C-alpha cells in the first residue's frame, strides 16, 4: 500500500521559521505537491517538486529527496494567517494514462503571537 | 488560472434522501475529475476517479451503488449520494485535471459540506 507520513500537529511563533516534514513509501512516484488547507475550505496549491532539490517561492520553499522518500515544506517569517493544515500529496500513476494524488493526513500548524 | 466550481457549498438532508453535488471546470476541459471525502481532522481520501464518457473508477471500500458518479461532459461531473445516512456526513471535494495535464493540473473545487440528519 501507499504510505505518506507527516507530523500531526506543530506550533510555531509568529515571525519564526518552521519546517514540516513528509516521508513517503509508495509504489511509484511522479511528483509531490504541498497544499495549504484552512478549516472547512478546499486545499490550495503551494508547491510542486519532481526533481531533487529546493524550490523557493516567496516565504515558502519545498525540498525533495527522491532517494530518501523525503520532502519538507519550509515557511519563513510566519504570519498568523499561516495557521492551517498543510498536506503532502504524491502523484501516482493509476493506469490507462491517468494519474492521481495520494494525500498524507496533513499537519495542523498553529502560529502563536 | 484554472477554476473549478463546486456546488452546493453546504447541504443538509434527511436520512434516506439523495443529494447531488456538481463539479464544473469553468475555463478548461477536464478529461478526469477526482472526488474526495474528508472527515473531521482527517486528510482527503480519494473516493473515485471520473473519466469523461466512461465509468468511474472507485477506490477500495467505496460503494459504487451508493456514490453515483456521472461525467457526461468535459466540464461537468456529478456525485450523487444515494439514500444518505448520518455516517455519510462529511466534506466532499472535487478536483479536475485538464486535458493538457501538467503540474498545475489538480485544481480543487471549494468543497461541499454534507450533513445528514
Image: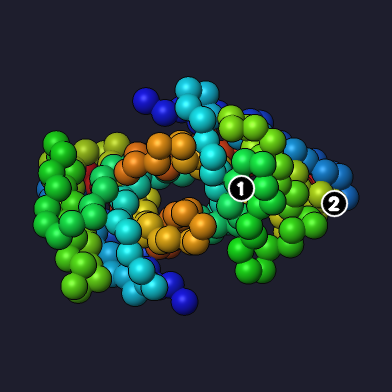
The residue at 64%/60% (across/down) is B58
The quadrant of the picture occupied by the C terminus of chain A is top left
Location of residue A8 in the rendering, given as x and y in whole percent from the top left corner? 36, 64
User: Residue B71, labelled with which disc?
Assistant: none
Task: Provide the chain ID for the residue under circle 2.
Answer: B
Q: Give left or right: position of B77 versus B100.
A: right
The mark nearer the N terminus, 1 or 2, is 1
10 Å crowding of disc 1: few (<14), some (14-19), many (20+): many
The residue at which mark 2 appears reads as: B83
In the depicted view, which residue is nearer to us: A88 or A31? Answer: A31
Element under label 2? Answer: loop
Residue at horizontal 25%, vertical 71%?
A69
Q: What residue does disc 1 label?
A: B50
Residue for point 54% across, 44% down: B32
Q: Residues within 10 Å of mark 2 (few under 14, many from 20)?
A: some
In the depicted structure, whether residue A89 falls above or below residue B101? below
> Do discs 1 and 2 belong to a common subunit?
yes
* In the image, farthest residue toward the front: A96
What residue do we see at 38% from left, 57% from top?
Answer: A91
Name the spot of residue A65 as percent of width and height, x first. 17, 65
Residue A62: x and y in percent read: 19, 52
Q: Is residue A80 visible?
A: yes
Q: Is residue B20 left or right of residue B30?
A: right
Snapshot quadrant of residue B115:
top right
Looking at the image, residue A54 sits to the left or right of residue B20; the answer is: left
Q: Secondary structure at mark 1?
A: strand
Residue A7 in view of the camera: no
Residue found at the very far right of the displayed protein: B16
Amino acid at each position: 500500500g501507499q504510505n505518506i507520513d507527516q507530523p500531526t500537529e506543530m506550533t510555531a511563533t509568529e515571525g519564526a521559521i518552521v519546517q514540516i516534514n513528509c516521508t513517503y513509501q509508495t509504489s511509484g512516484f511522479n511528483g509531490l505537491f504541498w497544499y495549504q488547507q484552512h478549516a472547512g475550505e478546499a486545499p490550495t496549491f503551494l508547491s510542486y517538486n519532481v526533481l531533487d532539490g529546493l524550490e523557493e517561492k516567496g516565504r515558502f520553499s519545498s525540498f525533495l529527496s527522491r532517494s530518501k522518500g523525503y520532502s519538507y515544506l519550509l515557511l519563513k517569517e510566519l504570519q498568523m494567517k499561516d495557521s492551517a493544515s498543510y498536506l503532502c500529496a504524491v502523484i501516482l500513476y493509476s493506469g490507462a494514462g491517468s494519474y492521481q494524488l495520494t494525500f498524507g493526513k496533513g499537519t495542523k500548524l498553529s502560529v502563536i503571537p | 488560472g484554472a477554476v473549478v466550481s463546486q456546488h452546493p457549498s453546504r447541504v443538509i438532508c434527511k436520512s434516506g434522501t439523495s443529494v447531488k453535488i456538481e463539479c464544473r471546470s469553468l475555463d478548461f476541459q477536464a478529461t478526469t475529475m477526482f472526488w474526495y471525502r474528508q472527515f473531521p481532522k482527517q486528510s482527503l481520501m480519494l473516493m473515485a476517479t471520473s473519466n469523461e464518457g466512461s465509468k468511474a473508477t472507485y477506490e477500495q471500500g467505496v460503494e459504487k451503488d451508493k456514490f453515483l458518479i456521472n461525467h457526461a461532459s468535459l466540464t461537468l461531473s456529478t456525485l450523487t449520494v444515494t439514500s444518505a445516512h448520518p455516517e455519510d456526513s462529511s466534506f466532499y471535494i472535487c478536483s479536475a485535471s485538464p486535458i493538457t495535464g501538467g503540474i498545475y493540473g489538480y485544481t480543487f473545487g471549494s468543497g461541499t459540506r454534507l450533513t445528514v440528519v
